[in-house]
Amino acid sequence: MQEEAYHIPVLLAECLDALQIDPAGTYVDCTFGGGGHSRAILENLGPDGRLVAFDQDADAAQNLPDDPRVLFVPHNFRHLQRFLRLHKIGSVNGVLADLGVSSHQFDEAERGFSIRFDADLDMRMDARSERTAAQLLQTYSEQQLHKLFEQYGEVTNARTLAKTIVTLRATMPMQTIQQFKAAIQGVVKGNPNKYLAQVFQALRIEVNDEMGALKELLEQLPEVLVQGGRAAIITFHSLEDRLVKQFFKQGSFEPEEDHPFENKKQLSLLKVITKKPIVPTMEEQKRNSRSRSAKLRVAERI
């Protein structure tokens, strides 16, 4: 499978520059996908270098290069430290994560990620997991649905949407994309494509526990990176970007509390390299429209 057709790697040169690759180092690509970032890292590694590639999507394995320096782990990156230990890897020189959904996942109609097709409302990145988007719509309470559409999709009328789903799901089928779109068409606000994209984003994030997985990955970075090792994380929406920014700065997800008599400032083991996120050039955005919302943040283990 051609990597360009599968997924065009975003901010490729910027990621390589950020990682400052040591030819004899060990690097982790947390989101292998089409393998574009991984191939570029391998080109900069010498014979003693090593790449550990994670991807929970079984389709990604088709893109693996025939290279003895590559170790493929067919699991979610939230299990980073566990699998590094399993393979006797104590620490690594760099970690890269491209948190976007791959073009391949959007373009495979049966995966249920895209509003462009009709298919079962699936949205699982890992087909081994049990919960699908359709199951979520049938089982979540009105309050749970309201919260996820508001937080993960920033849907303007999240409360109304949740109430509509709960009211109609007993009498209207919501197993497929078209059935779901038909059921909620009366409450769609503004640009229908934008609205539905926000709704689908919220469902996808919840089905795959994307925010939980990202938090777990970030918390492991100080332990797995060597001193001077770097983490480069590409996000595609503000929720992810805020988490990465906060953890890189503070070393935790707890809000910083100002106290007039105490200095309880959290000491982070990471030094922020990018005061502002790196974004794609206009040229890259024209070449790859899906890169438009990408933001790269980089931190170094101190």
Image (tube, helix red, strand yellow):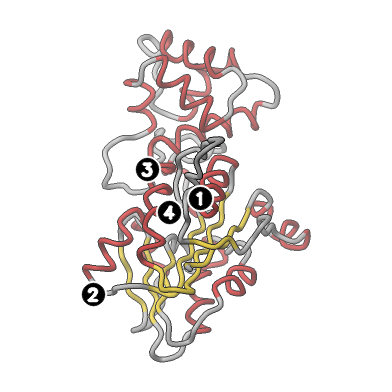
Disc 1: CA contacts within 10 A as few (<14), some (14-19) or many (>=20): some
Q: Nearer the viewer, residue 18 or 249?
A: 249
Q: Marks 4 and 1, Cα distance to the nearest angstrom? A: 12 Å
Q: Which residue is pictured at 50% across the width and 69% down the height?
A: 230
Tell me if mark 2 has few (under 14), some (14-19) or many (20+) residues whose alpha carbon lies within 10 angstroms of its own. Answer: few
Q: Residue 88 — which label?
A: 2
Looking at the image, is mark 4 or mark 3 earlier in the sequence?
3
Question: Type of residue at label 2?
Answer: Lys
Q: Secondary structure at mark 4?
A: helix
Number of labels in the image equals: 4
Of the residues shown, which amino acid type is indicated by label 1?
Gln
Q: Which residue is mark 4?
A: 218
Which residue is label 3 attached to?
124
Image point (59%, 17%), residue name? 157
Q: Secondary structure at mark 3?
A: loop
Residue 60 coordinates in the image, percent (x, y): 40, 62
Residue at horizontal 47%, vertical 80%?
Answer: 42
* Residue 269 against residue 266 in the figure, above or below: below
Give the mark nearest the N terminus, 4 or 1. Answer: 4
Foreground label between 3 and 2: 2
Please name whichever residue, 178 or 221, is drawn nearer the observer in this view of the structure: 221
Residue picked out by circle 1: 250
